[in-house]
Image: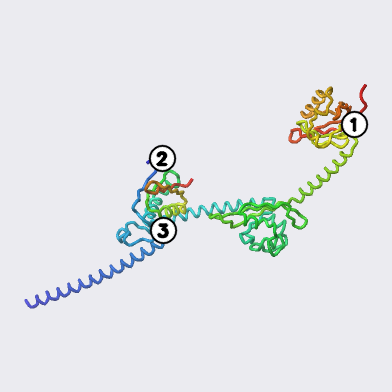
Amino acid sequence: MKLMEKAMGAFGRFAAAGELDRLARDNELLREREQTAVTYIRRKINQLLLVMGTLPLRPEELDDQTLLELDPIGIIADSFAQVLDHLNQTNDKLKLANREIQAILSAAGVGILVVNSEMRIEAFNQKLRELFLRDEGEIIGKPCYELLCKRQDPPESCTVEKVLASRVGAHLTAWEFGDRLFDVAGAPIRNRYGDVTNVVIVYHDITDRVRTEKALRETGEMYRNVFEHASDLIQSVSPDGTFNFVNRAWRETLGYNDAEVATLTLSDIIHPDHRDECLQNFRQLLAGARIDRVDTVFIARDGTPVPVEGNVSCIFANGSPVATSCIFRRVAPRV
Amino acid sequence: MDNGGQKVIQFDIRGQICPSTLLIALKEMNRHKEALRSGDMVLLFKTDNRDATVTIPDAAEHMGYGATVAKEANYYLITVDNGI
């Protein structure tokens, strides 16, 4: 019996020793697994920290227990959620802004072109295609000087080159394209470092305006020529009484040259006996009164009285008098 | 601390270095995001870690907040608000 008990005791000790060995092995395995997991977590945390733009964790900075308690992955994940929310909101705002810009570009009555720093086209509006590129196919990415200036290199007066070189706006008047004339204005688009990445060019068709101005100039010259050679005394007087224009007959009759006329005022050429009445008429004319006929007496440079009669009128702009226009004929002195 | 109806919470994280300074700031920005977004709260971080004067404002701005850095006598004061 005692022999049996001894055998059982020995077996029990043997079994316990085996269990301890197994537990020790399991414990070692679990430690290795934990270490592997912690190493993985640190690697992923460092990866996320680098994405956030900061330094990796140093092992001495956070021990494994504190690392799990602080939960850096959870913190960064929550931050990323906020970053994504913000990006989504920013994207929505950008989409809206883009739609607004497209609507403005479409509605604009001028041609608008956006090129990059290599002068290649990045964007344009419908008006630009109508003005210059009706028959062109795909134009994005092509150099603007090839399509618009029809050259292999930028021209000497290139607005885009001026903007890129000066980094400020540039302006070119009367740029010719076919039989049309354009006012060309360029403005830089800068990145956050101040470098010019793009240039916006606006083409305003001024052909009709230039033609109208030319016609007006020619008409003006014609009338000036007619007035200059008329036998009547013709004058245009500003509201302050100075002379805008007098014709040759006026100068010859009253004895003043152009330089002297520039120093005169209306009261200087009116005979003292008629000055008050004449200036009263002038003020009424400026105030909007209609005065069809004027009889008065001018006084020449040498003091000779010059009786005249004539018609006067006043030109108004936006409700304000700009100048009086008067045509006088010399008449015989009244007895 | 109360600043004209706006709650101000100040964190003194002097002595901490990166990335701990950023993690602490991120944790507080996450914790108080609703109040920060509505403008009801402003967070102030006192730090003597120069790197944090870049990492914290950068992260705050990426998250849609406003951030400013002021140099004080012996620390930097980083202010995080809703940026409006």
Tell me: residue B64, above or below residue A17.
above
Report crowding for label 2: few under 14, some 14 to 19, many 20 or more residues within 10 A (C-alpha): few
Answer left or right for A116 relative to A129: left
Quadrant in which residue A283 is drawn: top right
Q: Could you confirm whether marks 3 and 2 are on the same chain?
A: no
Report crowding for label 1: few under 14, some 14 to 19, many 20 or more residues within 10 A (C-alpha): some
Amino acid, disc 2: Asn
Q: How many marks?
A: 3
Answer left or right for A329 relative to A51: right
Q: Which residue is mark 2?
A: B3
Q: Could you confirm whether marks 1 and 2 are on the same chain?
A: no
Which of pointers 3 and 2 indicates the residue nearer the eye?
A: 3
**Mark 1 belongs to chain:** A
Tell me: residue B57, above or below residue A307.
below
Identify the secondary structure beneath mark 1. Answer: strand
- Residue at the left extreme of this rendering: A2
Q: Which residue is mark 1?
A: A329
Task: In this rendered view, identify the residue nearer to me: A14 or A58.
Answer: A58
**Mark 3 belongs to chain:** A
Q: Which residue is mark 3?
A: A54
Q: Where's residue A17, x and y in %?
A: 17, 73
Quadrant in which residue B54 is drawn: bottom left
Which of pointers 3 and 1 indicates the residue nearer the eye?
A: 1
Identify the secondary structure beneath mark 3. Answer: loop
Q: Is residue A294 visible?
A: no
Amino acid, disc 3: Thr
